[in-house]
Amino acid sequence: MSNILEVLSQNIEVDKDKCVFCARCVDACTMDNLRMKLAPCQKACPLGLNCQGYVQLIVRGNEGKALEFIGKKLPFPGILGRICHHHCESECSRNKVDGEGVALRVLKRYLSDNLELVLEDIEPEKELDEKVAIIGGGPAGIMAAFTLRTKGYQVTVYEAQNKLGGMLSGCIPEFRLPEEIVQKELSLLHNMGIEILYNTKVGKDIPFTDILNQYDAVIIAIGTQGAKKIGLTGEKSENVYDALSFLRQVRNKQEIKVGKKALVIGGGNTAIDAAQTAHRLGCEEVRVVCLESYQEMPAYKWEVADALEEGIIIEHGWGPKQFIVEDNQIRGVVFKRCLSVFDEDGNLNPKFSEDETQIFEADTVVVAIGQEVEPGLDLGSIQTNRGFIITDSVTKQTSVDKVFAAGDITIGPKSVADAMAQGREAAISVDRFLRDLPIGFDRDPFASCQLDFEVDLSKAEMIPRVCPEKLEGEERASFKELEKSITKEQALMEAKRCLSCGEPYGKYRTCWYCSPCEVECPREAIKVNKPYLIR
């Protein structure tokens, strides 16, 4: 005969064909019995997106609900459906079956391309009097603005450019992220009633002190708009560009002259973007030269693969030594062999052989060795380190209580998803600060989740991963979007590759059949079995 504890451990039933893995039942459990086995894809996502939920909704044929599911945490699915670094896919349990995770980024794009995102609950229940200023309309700023406006705050965004988006609309090439997608999704902020002051650079057009005096809280999200310099004689020659300026001019349809041979110095995503852009501008030979080996390159491997497919040459293990200059024009660059890139602690500390050199000819040079904080903004007493704002790692609060900071200005360049996630965390802190609540309490959304559990792979079918088609021929050399969307049939087949790892379950044997988990479940997916004597 089973004892009562064994009965209590088995009384929770979850119908995984109905469950959307939202964890509302876990939150509703008054006896602290339920826990969520968290799918590794959601844990890996900086934004905490419930990937398992929207993928399973695609499997069930409920694509509209799937997009709505995404939109509640990510109101810009078309943007991240194209440029997200999708670390979620690297952590996907599907890798243990056939070595390839579910194509989650591609599925996001499929939904956003084929359905209209309608967010019914973005209107604040109550308009609040408190005013919040957000300095910078890039990824961190737009997410912070969205989050605060949904809570009812009066939000003003100060944007130095004539449009929102930061790097999204300023530097990422159109063949990777079309302008119409960016502006379509960012129009949501205008529709929500957020005030956006364009062509307004804080520190130049309005003093930072005025912002502090006029608003109840401030979020600084200005990113890293400055380009690092190599520091060699000749770097200011007419045919030398920093990568950000180069990409910005092309994105803004400004005329830019390139020769037959383009040389890009750097190994990151910006360098690859610049190389592919030079190729599309008509350069006959485009060469990327970087310190790193292929494995060490910080550029995403799929972007490197695209560049190689287009005939772009990548030279590994070389660092610039000298520019060859004639009549204020670069004719070539002398490189020295890089023996190692990082020191024992993993910090960038390259070592070179001055004796082993190589010359690459060029009539256009693009320097893409990193980004830094653009000088000019006087932050007063806010503490900084090498131009980056020092914040609390969890709350994003600075040394001035009412000022918060998010995105690249605090940690240096990372991914768009990381910047958006920081913007949201800063907004949550502002909300708590203005309501006089502890801003650092209970900030880990996965603290009560089960992260280490066995995934049943026994019934996994071998289904090939979907590979979106790309432009070919002459179109490939244009600025048309490089990657195509997938079909409905492909999306369904890819979604079926999901092993649906996570689920809520009764862990602590403390259930006393009060049933709020059943009541709160939006899909009627959970059932509490009550023993006969209790009934």
Image (cartoon, rainbow, N blue to C red):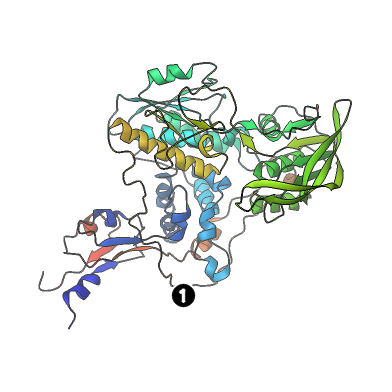
On screen, 276 above or below 384?
Answer: below
- Residue behind mark 1: 459
Residue found at the far front of this picture = 344
On screen, 245 above or below 485?
Answer: above
Q: Nearer the viewer, residue 512 or 266?
A: 266
Let me know if residue 285 appears in the view.
no
Tell me where residue 126 appears, x and y as whole percent: 27, 31
- Secondary structure of the residue carrying numbered label 1: loop
Q: For residue 151, which quarter of the picture?
A: top left
For the N terminus, which image quadrant? bottom left
Q: Using residue 516 as the reference point, say whether residue 199 is left or right of it.
A: right
Q: Using residue 471 as the reference point, say whether residue 131 is left or right of it.
A: left
Q: For residue 225, which quarter of the picture?
A: top right
Q: Residue at x 24, y 62 (%)?
A: 33
For the C terminus, which image quadrant? bottom left
Q: Residue at x 30, y 57 (%)?
A: 523
Q: Using residue 458 as the reference point, say whether residue 387 is left or right of it.
A: right
Instruction: Decide: few, some or many residues near mark 1? Use Cα within 10 Å; few <14, some 14-19, many ≥20.
Output: few
Q: Residue at x 83, y 37 (%)?
A: 322
Q: Nearer the viewer, residue 164 or 435?
A: 435
Tell me where residue 239 appears, x and y as whole percent: 80, 30
Tell me where residue 286 appears, x and y as whole percent: 80, 43
Q: Nearer the viewer, residue 279 or 361?
A: 361
